Image (spheres, rainbow, N blue to C red):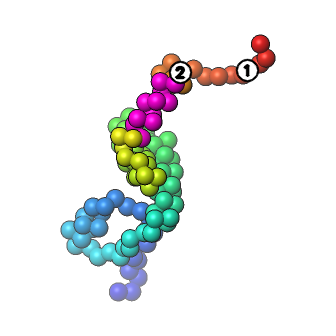
């Protein structure tokens, strides 16, 4: 068809997206990434999701973007050989040793005592 534009995405998508596209009656072209390329694309996806969180206009949309970011972080942890549980354990250890961000402490400067 003349004038018909086919969108090109060239980006990592969630596993069920091809089936969703197929169910909508559309066709698609995809491929499975090699490990190094997969890690690179996950990093790009993490940046994309973080930007979407920053720009989220409502609390609900912000929460949804944080959930997407968490999904990407868990996939990145898996690339590095860690499970979500192991990642959480490391987070808990760091929280125990260095604290969290609950107290909203903003360090302005340090000096010699």
* Residue 70 percent across, percent down from the top left: 40, 44
Q: Which residues are magenta?
A: 87-97
In the drawing, what numbered circle is on residue 110? 1
Is 104 rendered above or below residue 59?
Answer: above
Report the residue marked by disc 2: 104
* Residue at 49% from the left image edge and 66% from the top image edge: 37
* Residue at 27% from the left image edge and 61% from the top image edge: 16
Circle count: 2
Q: Main secondary structure of the magenta part?
A: helix
* Residue 80 percent across, percent down from the top left: 46, 52
The image quadrant of residue 108 is top right
Per the image, label 1 sits on a secondary structure element best described as: loop
**Quarter of the figure with the N terminus:** bottom left
- Asked if residue 74 lies left or right of residue 94, the reply is left
First of labels 1, 2 by sequence position: 2
The image quadrant of residue 2 is bottom left
Identity of the residue furthest to the right in this view: 112
Whether residue 1 is in magenta: the answer is: no
């Amino acid at each position: 068809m003349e004038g018909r534009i086919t969108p090109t995405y060239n980006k990592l998508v969630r596993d069920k997206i091809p089936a969703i596209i197929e169910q909508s009656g559309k066709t698609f072209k995809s491929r499975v990434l090699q490990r190094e390329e997969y890690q690179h694309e996950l990093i790009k996806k993490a940046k994309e999701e973080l930007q979407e969180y920053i720009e989220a206009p409502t609390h609900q949309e912000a929460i949804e973007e944080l959930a997407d970011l968490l999904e990407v972080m868990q996939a990145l942890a898996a690339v590095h050989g860690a499970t979500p549980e192991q990642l959480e354990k490391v987070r808990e250890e760091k929280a125990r040793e260095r604290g969290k961000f609950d107290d909203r402490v903003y360090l302005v400067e340090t000096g010699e005592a």
